[in-house]
Image (tube, rainbow, N blue to C red):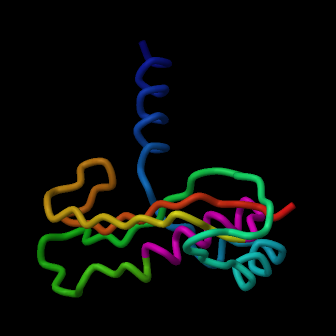
């Protein structure tokens, strides 16, 4: 029973989206972040898909009055792609949720998702 509870808690925690802190990136990831491209439209260079990546801008209390930031959510996307040593992120889509976001423990959130790629 105890293992079942620990497993369920682990699954719940890993399902949450959070942006990594800049301090958590190692030197090679910081370099990748500095070079990271956000690409739109047709991509002329061949590439491999690494993974889907998500970033978030989150109001953790109902009293927060600052605007949710697409830029913060996209920065989270770029940081997660940098941790995967990607060259770029494509197909970014952002969605604002004005209702309580139980998954991410936010009163409201802006979540952006994209595809991290590595050029061949």
Which residue is nearer to you in this view: 11 or 110? 110
Q: Residue at x 74, y 70 (%)?
A: 44
- Is-magenta flag for residue 116? no
User: Where is residue 89, by image quadrant?
Assistant: bottom right
Which residue is nearer to you in this view: 1 or 53? 53
Quarter in which the C terminus is drawn = bottom right
Residue 30 placement (x, y as % from top left) = 75, 79
Task: Indicate left or right for 57 with 68 as reference.
Answer: right
Which residue is nearer to you in this view: 60 or 30? 30
Q: Residue at x 12, y 78 (%)?
A: 63
Which residue is nearer to you in this view: 84 or 58? 84
User: Where is residue 106, by image quadrant?
Assistant: bottom left
Looking at the image, the residue that sits furthest to the right is 120
State whether the magenta stretch is mostly helix, strand or loop.
helix
Quarter in which the N terminus is drawn = top left
Q: Residue at x 76, y 53 (%)?
A: 48
Tell how many labels: 0
Looking at the image, the residue that sits furthest to the top is 1
Task: Indicate left or right for 119 with 21 as reference.
Answer: right
| Magenta-highlighted residues | 73-87
Task: Indicate left or right for 33 with 21 as reference.
Answer: right
User: Where is residue 38, by image quadrant?
Assistant: bottom right
Q: Is residue 45 above or below residue 115?
A: below
- Is-magenta flag for residue 80? yes
Residue 39 placement (x, y as % from top left) = 60, 75
Residue 33 placement (x, y as % from top left) = 70, 78
Residue 71 placement (x, y as % from top left) = 43, 83
């Amino acid at each position: 029973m105890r293992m079942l509870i620990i497993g369920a808690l682990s699954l719940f925690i890993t399902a949450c989206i959070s942006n990594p802190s800049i301090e958590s990136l190692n030197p090679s990831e910081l370099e990748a972040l500095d070079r990271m491209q956000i690409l739109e439209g047709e991509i002329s260079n061949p590439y491999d898909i690494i993974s889907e990546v998500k970033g978030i801008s989150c109001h953790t209390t109902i009293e927060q009055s600052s605007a949710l930031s697409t830029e913060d959510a996209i920065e989270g996307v770029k940081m997660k792609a940098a941790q995967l040593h990607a060259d770029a992120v494509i197909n970014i889509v952002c969605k604002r949720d004005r209702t309580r976001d139980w998954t991410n423990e936010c009163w409201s959130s802006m979540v952006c998702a994209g595809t991290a790629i590595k050029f061949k």
